Image (spheres, rainbow, N blue to C red):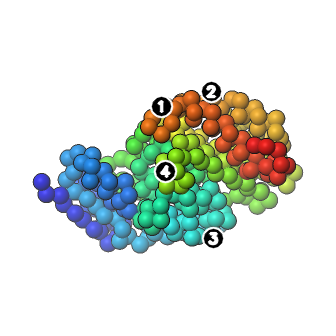
Amino acid sequence: MSVQYYSPGSFTEALQVLERNSNYTLLAGGTDVVPRLNLRQVKGLQGLIYLGNIVEMKKIVEHNEHIFIGALVTHACIAASELIKQKAYNVWYASYHMGTPAIRNVGTIGGNLVNASPAGDSCVALLAAGALASIKSLHENRLVPINEFFVDKGKTVLKPGEILYGVYLPKAATGIKKGCSYQRIGTLKGSSTAIINIAVEIEQDTDGMCRACRIGAGAVASTPVRLYSLEEIFVDKRINWNLIEQAVNEVDAYINPIDDTYATAWYRRKVIKVLLKRALAEASGLASEQKEV
């Protein structure tokens, strides 16, 4: 069976090709698609649309209120970006520790999102960042909060004819101090799928009051998730160890991990409490009090 291959030179051309061939598979870095092709896991493949020549989707741009990361920006580029490290630490950390150098050099942040793995490292970081996904087609442009982007394992809100163009990361307001922490554990450092990964961002005003808290977690449900009920524990309060202990004690009620080849659900429930405590302490600044976490 022959497979058609397109390599559009612009984003508009890519949308036009996809409009005519909505069943074709989009190809960016190929770190997910190519292994699936080799294992014959892609059924009924009719065509590939390679996006790697679209320069505008490979940019990182800082604006007044947000930072834009194009969907084709590689993890290596994010890991090398001082801007992302300083303004969106968790996103930087996820890319810096993503897989192996070979994966980071070609794998893209957009591909990690569209793959929609329940344990996707960038997915968890972007949830904690409160990011927005920029989705475009020939007929519509829309912004979707990352927490609404994932539908199920391997499934997103992308409709036929749509392409993930990039993500917008909101910047903290003036006078707000943002603390970040990313914690993960895998069978091998960095290069393995996360058994549990968690990202926390906490925004505090000059009086030390928490004005926003975002907690993203992976490998605890069928998609990466925001733990909204835990976030509410901290908002409009001064964060202390008692509040952190409360969140750790309640996390069981808001996750639904499974047994798989990487770990048991029982183990994940134990580990997330340790990582959540570390992340909350680090992001809030309490870790410096030298209490064991």
The reply to whether residue 77 is visible in this rendering is: yes
| Residue at the disc numbered 3 | 82
| Residue at the disc numbered 4 | 192
Q: Position of residue 221 (x, y in %)?
A: 51, 35
Nearest to N terminus: mark 1 or mark 3: 3
The crowding category of the residue bearing disc 4, from other C-alpha atoms within 10 Å (few below 14, some 14 to 19, many at least 20), is some
Give the Cα separation between the discs numbered 2 and 3: 38 Å
42 to the left or right of 85: left
288 to the left or right of 223: right
Nearest to N terminus: mark 2 or mark 1: 2
Nearest to N terminus: mark 3 or mark 4: 3
The crowding category of the residue bearing disc 3, from other C-alpha atoms within 10 Å (few below 14, some 14 to 19, many at least 20), is few
Q: Quadrant of residue 275?
A: top right
Give the Cα separation between the discs numbered 3 and 4: 25 Å
The answer to whether the residue labelled 2 contacts the one labelled 3, judged by CB atoms less than 8 Å apart, is no
The crowding category of the residue bearing disc 2, from other C-alpha atoms within 10 Å (few below 14, some 14 to 19, many at least 20), is few
| Residue at the disc numbered 1 | 259
Per the rendering, the mark at residue 63 is none
| Residue at the disc numbered 2 | 253
Nearest to N terminus: mark 2 or mark 4: 4
Q: Amino acid at mark 2?
A: Ala
Q: Quadrant of residue 171?
A: bottom right
Q: Looking at the picture, tell me which residue is in the foreground, 66 or 90.
A: 90
The answer to whether the residue labelled 4 contacts the one labelled 1, judged by CB atoms less than 8 Å apart, is no
Q: Quadrant of the C terminus?
A: top right
Which element type, helix, strand or loop, lies under badge 1?
Answer: loop
* Residue at the image position 51 percent from the left and 69 percent from the top: 77
Q: Looking at the picture, tell me which residue is in the foreground, 93 or 188.
A: 188
Q: Amino acid at mark 4?
A: Ser
* Residue at the image position 47 percent from the left and 61 percent from the top: 100
Q: Position of residue 194 (x, y in %)?
A: 52, 46
